[in-house]
Amino acid sequence: MVRENEIREAEVAVEMPPTTDAGLIFIGRIYTPWTSRMETPRQGRTDGPVCRIEIFEPWVAALDSLGQFERIEVLYWLHLSRRDLVMQSPANDGTARGTFSLRSPARPNPIGTSIAQLVGVEGSVVTVRGLDCLNGTPLLDLKPDRGLFTPIAPSQPGDFQVGDP
Ligand code: SAM
């Protein structure tokens, strides 16, 4: 069951330690059709709606060569999530599981990731299908899908190769 920020039976919240400044910066913003968590898909689908990612300056130059990839990994900050739950009840049925065994948006560092189908890159805008975040969600990073990426530098023993499981 998709949630807002309520505490459910069997869930456990802890007192949040003070946050540390990891130096994260939001490099853009994601525009999707969803304005309520209750309507946002739990995981993106590649046949989902086209969503628009706007990259802020000075990071637009970093989009160079991204367009050659069919799929990209999108990392975002699930900014409305609560961060203090260690046990969660996704089904709201009186049972709970540890946060790290779930892909719930409620986690100490609410980072969401999706493998998205790249539709296009034009100027400062990247369009993709396959997201599951609210309209206005801050963007943390974009990377080529690991399975499509061959390291540019000469390979080293133990490197991942395209086609590896
Ligand atoms: N695909 C990502 C992952 O696996 O890391 C996120 C999955 S999470 C289950 C997706 C849910 O997070 C959505 O259904 C919605 O309820 C919630 N959500 C989406 N955007 C959010 C935001 N900006 N802040 C808080 N919750 C959000």
Image: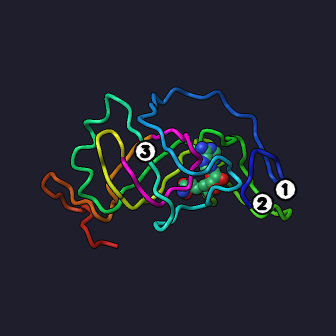
- Mark 3 is on which residue type? Ile
Bin the neighbour count of mark 1 within 10 Å (Cα to Cα): few under 14, some 14-19, many 20 and up.
Answer: some
Which of the colour schemes (rainbow, by chain, secondary structure, one colour) is used? rainbow
Is 120 displayed left or right of 103 in the figure?
A: left
**Disc 1 C-beta below 8 A from ligand 1:** no
Query: Quarter of the image containing the N terminus?
Result: bottom right
**Where in the figure is residue 105, as x and y percent of width and height?**
63, 50
Between tags 2 and 3, which lies in front?
A: 3
Q: Tag 1 or tag 2, which sits nearer the N-term?
A: 1
Find out if the beta carbon at label 2 lies less than 8 Å from the nearest ligand 1 atom: no
- Earlier sequence position, callout 2 versus callout 3: 3
Quarter of the view holding residue 99: bottom right
Number of marks in the rendered image: 3
Q: Is residue 3 visible?
A: yes
Foreground label between 1 and 3:
3
Q: Which mark is residue 10?
A: 1
Dot 1: what SS?
loop
- Circle 2 residues within 10 Å: few <14, some 14–19, many ≥20: some
Q: Which residue is pictured at 48% across the width and 60% down the height?
A: 130
Q: Is residue 82 left or right of residue 53?
A: right
User: Is residue 130 magenta-colored?
Assistant: yes
Say what secondary structure mark 3 lies in: strand
- Looking at the picture, which amino acid does disc 1 mark? Ala
Q: Is 98 above or below relative to 28?
A: below
Q: On the image, numbered disc 2 is attached to which residue?
A: 96
Q: How far separated are the C-alphas under marks 1 and 3?
A: 37 Å
Q: Are marks 2 and 1 in contact (CB under 8 Å)?
A: yes
Mark 3 is surrounded, within 10 Å at the Cα level, by few (under 14), some (14 to 19) or many (20 or more) other residues, namely many
- Pick the front one: 19 or 125: 125
x and y percentages locating residue 60 in the rendered image: 30, 36
Q: Is residue 61 above or below residue 126?
A: above
